[in-house]
Image (spheres, rainbow, N blue to C red):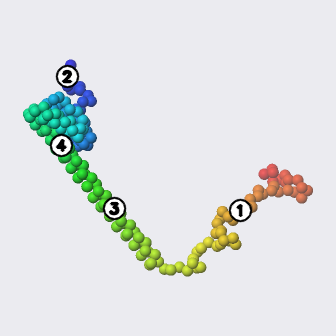
Amino acid sequence: MRSSKSRSRGNKNRNTRPTGGNIINRVFDSSGPDGKVRGTPQQIIDKYNQLHRDAQLSNDRVAAENFAQHAEHYTRMLAEALREVEKAREEQEEENRRRQAERDRERSERLKAQEDAANSSPSVDPAESDQPELADNGLVETPESQPKQRRPRPRKPKPETASDGEPDQTAAAE
């Protein structure tokens, strides 16, 4: 009989922490001294700061310091995450600026090449160019505007007839 460990399905990487991602909006479960605090890092910081103030008002210096340390921990996590987001944003902006500069350079090269091609091509007299003929009404004549000319169909040869008007029997016998 097989062990259940070898047959476990679907729980791949279940015990690993999520890597990367947006921890600014991620929900955490913080096991603090007064039980669990759940929320985003900013919500947890606010909760621990409130617990810190409450402990100070009740003259519990140890609990107040503990809550302050928990709030500081999440403040550092949030600050690090914000620095990473800002760094990624700056890198993206730099990449966008680089791409835009490349597109601008390619566009200017393309325009310069077009100008050079236009300047180097021999000037053609419009009257001598192969322009379509203009009709009396000023429109260009196109094959579609021409009336269709019917080609005569080839006719079938008529059977040879004798001089009396009846078909020749000798040609039919052969």
The residue to which callout 3 is attached is 100
The residue sitting at 20% across, 44% down in the picture is: 78
44 vs 139, nearest the viewer: 44
The tag earlier along the polypeptide, 4 or 3, is 4
Judged from the image, the secondary structure of the residue bearing numbered disc 4 is: helix
153 vs 69, nearest the viewer: 69
Which three-letter amino acid code belongs to the residue tagged 1? Lys
Decide: few, some or many residues near mark 1? Use Cα within 10 Å; few <14, some 14-19, many ≥20.
Answer: few
Q: How far apart in space, not on screen, are marks 3 and 1 (Cα)?
A: 55 Å
Image marks 3 and 1: residues in contact by CB distance under 8 Å: no
Q: Residue 149: which quarter of the image? A: bottom right
Residue 134 as seen in the image, left or right of residue 44: right
The tag earlier along the polypeptide, 3 or 2, is 2
Q: Which mark is residue 159?
A: none
Which three-letter amino acid code belongs to the residue tagged 3? Gln
Q: Which mark is residue 3?
A: 2
